[in-house]
Image (spheres, grey):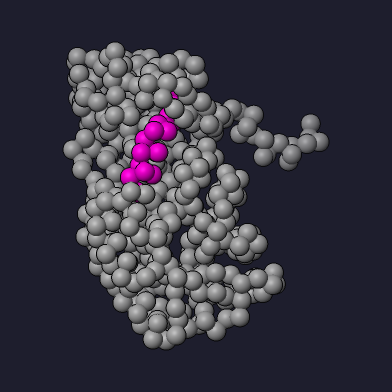
Amino acid sequence: MESNWSKYFSYKHNELSCENVPLSKIAEEIGTPFYVYSKKAILDKIKEYKEAFSDIDTLICYATKANPNLSILKVVKEEGLGADIVSGGELFKARKAGISPKKIVYAGVGKTDFELDYAVREEILAFNVESKEELTVLNEIAGKRKKKARIAIRVNPDVDPKTHPYISTGLKKSKFGIDIDEAIDAYKFAKSLENIEIVGIHCHIGSQIMDVSPYKEAIEKVLNLVEKLKKEGIELSHIDIGGGLGIRYRPEDTPPKPKDLADIIVPLVKNSGLKLVLEPGRSLIGEAGALVSKVLFTKNKKEKHFIIIDTGMNDLMRPSIYNAYHHIIAVKPKEKKVVADIVGPICETGDFLALDREIDDLKRGDLLAIMSAGAYGASMSSNYNVRPRACEVLVDNDTFKVIREREDYNYLIKPEEKALEGEV
């Protein structure tokens, strides 16, 4: 029998449960596919972060892009966390969930004028600015509102985070931020702007980082820059080191813990006297979630065996675009194993969840769970092939509730219907 994935997703009475709710029970009531999240897993990880960084003044801003569901944001808010946002839509959701603007930081290379104006009006904690031109535009927008926009400049420390190239963000060749050797000029420019208030410095070296050692080099470089800024008369109040801690995708993975990160960062930042801002996303929500799907068909083509399921790259893009590994397990285990491609219904060859994977010999109607899908699963999903997106469920001990309803066909055509009015 497959061993338990975690204390939040475990086999009880020979059936996979999330906390104390059998996944088959949820499937019977709401159908498949669906995302399911363990509330306890989220709360435990938040507690882990708080305890790890308790020796220093720290603001934890949840990286909303990982999973922006309002109910998840509500849990985050109730635990006293802020939000790291990358769009006006994420700002809207964070505020809707009740997160204070004084706990919101805003990154992203392509903020529109509308988004900048919205965030200025909300008086967020800081814009993590990514270019001199953005500073100019932000200054003009803030001036029109007769407000001062608080900023931190996102600097690239040019540190290799040893992760997938698509999610490495702190190298010189990256589109993000300002190179560290150009940052002093950018800060001097910001200081010259009437409607800009300099409050911090920001860096984010990448995502799914399994070795915390690159953080040490990055923070040391950034703090060295902070000292140089002091000599220029530019005083900062916080340092935002981003997020990026990796999670367990494979059974054998041993990702770093928040304490491992704190052991490196806290001594460095403590000496600087700056407040610390963290932006965890994947590491808060990733392992708390799974995507549950049903087998539609199985088929053999010569030596290749296929398990065709009712979810695909429209619901979980990571395997298709990153060739990312997600562990997949049967909801009700079987004795016999097979090697199969686990594929979805989308009309693309790249629509797969796993290739040449050993898995239980599943048949039509059986359920499987795609693990560690809480982050960048639902948030990256689409309606490709005009498919309604999966619903989302939050489990709390022995109860569950739908926190995002399953879309239907009427939902999909709603934005297009007005164009047809008056036509025969």
Residue 269 part of the magenta segment: no
- Farthest residue to the bottom: give it: 232
Location of residue 82 in the rendering, given as x and y in whole percent from the top left corner: 49, 52
- The quadrant in which residue 358 appears is top left
- The quadrant in which residue 295 appears is top left
Location of residue 345 in the rendering, given as x and y in whole percent from the top left corner: 42, 28
Location of residue 411 in the rendering, given as x and y in whole percent from the top left corner: 63, 32
The residue under the point 20% across, 43% down is 254
Relative depth, front residue between 398 and 394: 398
Residue range corresponding to the magenta coloring: 32-49
Position above or below: 42 against 244: above
Locate the N terminus and report the quarter of the image it occupies.
top left
Relative depth, front residue between 142 and 417: 142
The residue under the point 42% across, 53% down is 60
Say left or right for 9 vs 394: left
The residue under the point 38% across, 86% down is 231
Location of residue 149 in the rendering, given as x and y in whole percent from the top left corner: 58, 70
